[in-house]
Image (cartoon, grey):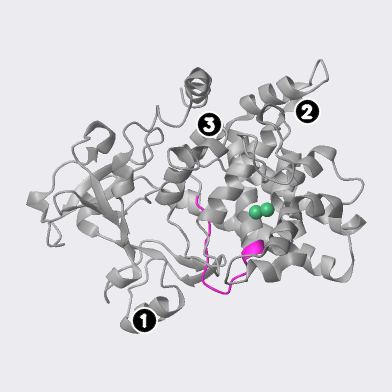
Amino acid sequence: MPITLTIDELEPGMRLAQAVYNNAQLILAAGKTLEDWEIDGLRRRFPQITVRVGDPLLDEWVDFQDDSREQTVAVTVNRRMARMMQTVRSKLGTQTALEGPDLIALQVAVHEMMIYIQQNPVAAAMLMHMAEGSDYLQEHAANVFYLGLLIGSTIREYVYLERKRTTRARDLAVRFGMNLTPLAIGCLLHDLGMIALEPLLNKPGPLDATEREQVNRHPLLGAEMLPKQMDAVCRMVIRTHHENCCGTGYPSSVPSDSLHVFSRVIRVADAYDAGTSRRCYRQAKSAVRVLWEMSVGPLKDLYDPVVIRILTSLIQPFPIGAKIRIHDGRYVVVVRHNRKHPFRPTAIIAFDEHGNKLKKSQLRQPIDLSQNEDIRLIRYAEEDLAFLNDTVDFVAAPVSAGQAGEVDSMFNMVYP
Ligand SMILES: [Fe+2]
Ligand SMILES: [Fe+2]
């Protein structure tokens, strides 16, 4: 199995351990032996992607975590929901609102995907990010749907308890309290209000005050575009998807105490996908950078710590096979994700300080980096990881003292 390499590290003769996709379309099949012209093509079209190639020696030596099922689920959901969003957009181009049959088709698609995800539980979320020129809103809607639903399904108990805490009804039926449909539909349609503002999404420079105001209204606009018969909770999810857990955010700066648990889930799913997507005014940030910023870095106060804890357990900041430079110049290859310490996976030292592959006689057993703090991660795929080494304690850092007990007990409930 696999070493995950950047396009620049590929060489002719390497064998793909995993298929290469763009917009959920297959570009190169797993098992393909790469030729010069194919590497050139990848370099030209998708300069930023990483590719998994086989390494028979490591494969024989180590039991890599297998996340092929995760990839299949991600591609299936992304393809179906991106197609759904394409239909929604073309309908909205010819009429002002979603109407009867279109709405039913959308509800059916969401329902089917919810069942699919339930029947195909995954341990890790893998989002699809595409080449330049792909349809951002479509891809983003599909990713937020997928991630929002995975987070929601993982913390159903928390969803129920939080809905119960914030509802005025005395007895919230468990079935109703745990129903994730409004969250799922809200996630898919959350940026409906941005469709009319798409030129602003593609504006290379900063927005002026009027444009900023228009963008700040897109949650309200989107909620208004929903058909009348749409669930009120779903409308609320769309209206509040940019509200922050600390009481800031737009359009209403809802105080944190009254922010619905679905709003907190979609906020996290939306911010993660937006951060890791390439936009015309900036490069995509890496998964590790965005996860760090959201969980322990400068943005951590914006999000619900319970939801963030689930996010960091679902997203692999370093994919299986990632080749990471360590403090002494050698390279490790990631073997297994660590759900509790996402920035400290299990990895094997597989390359010397000159980048040469170690021979079988030089290989040792994989190392659990969460138990070996002396090994510092320095660089991954052109990214300087110095910021990670400022993070003293991942577990303690993201929450305030008052929240710590709640987060820990919730986390232990989800991952006993
Ligand atoms: Fe938005
Ligand atoms: Fe969004």
| Residue in the image at 76% along x and 57% along y | 192
Q: CA distance from mark 1 to mark 3?
A: 43 Å
Give how far apart the Cα atoms at labels 2 and 1 are. 53 Å
Q: Nearer the viewer, mark 1 or mark 3?
A: 3
Q: Reading the chain from its start, which is encountered first: label 2 or label 3?
A: 2
Image height of 55 relative to 155, above or below: below
Earlier sequence position, callout 2 versus callout 1: 1
The crowding category of the residue bearing disc 1, from other C-alpha atoms within 10 Å (few below 14, some 14 to 19, many at least 20), is some
> Is residue 345 visible in this depiction of the protein?
no
Is residue 390 shown left or right of residue 309? left
From what the image shows, is residue 298 above or below residue 60? Answer: above
Residue 176 is tagged as: 2
Q: Is residue 353 magenta?
A: no
Q: Position of residue 266 (x, y in %)?
A: 64, 43
Please report the bounds of the magenta region as a residue range.
126-137
The residue lying furthest to the top in this view is: 170
Q: Quadrant of residue 245?
A: top right
Q: Circle 1 sits in a helix, a strand or a loop, which is it? A: helix
What is the three-letter code of the residue carrying label 2? Phe
Note whether 53 is above or below 152 in the view shown.
Answer: below
**Ligand 2 under 8 Å from disc 1 Cβ:** no
Q: Which mark is residue 305?
A: 3
> What residue does disc 1 label?
40
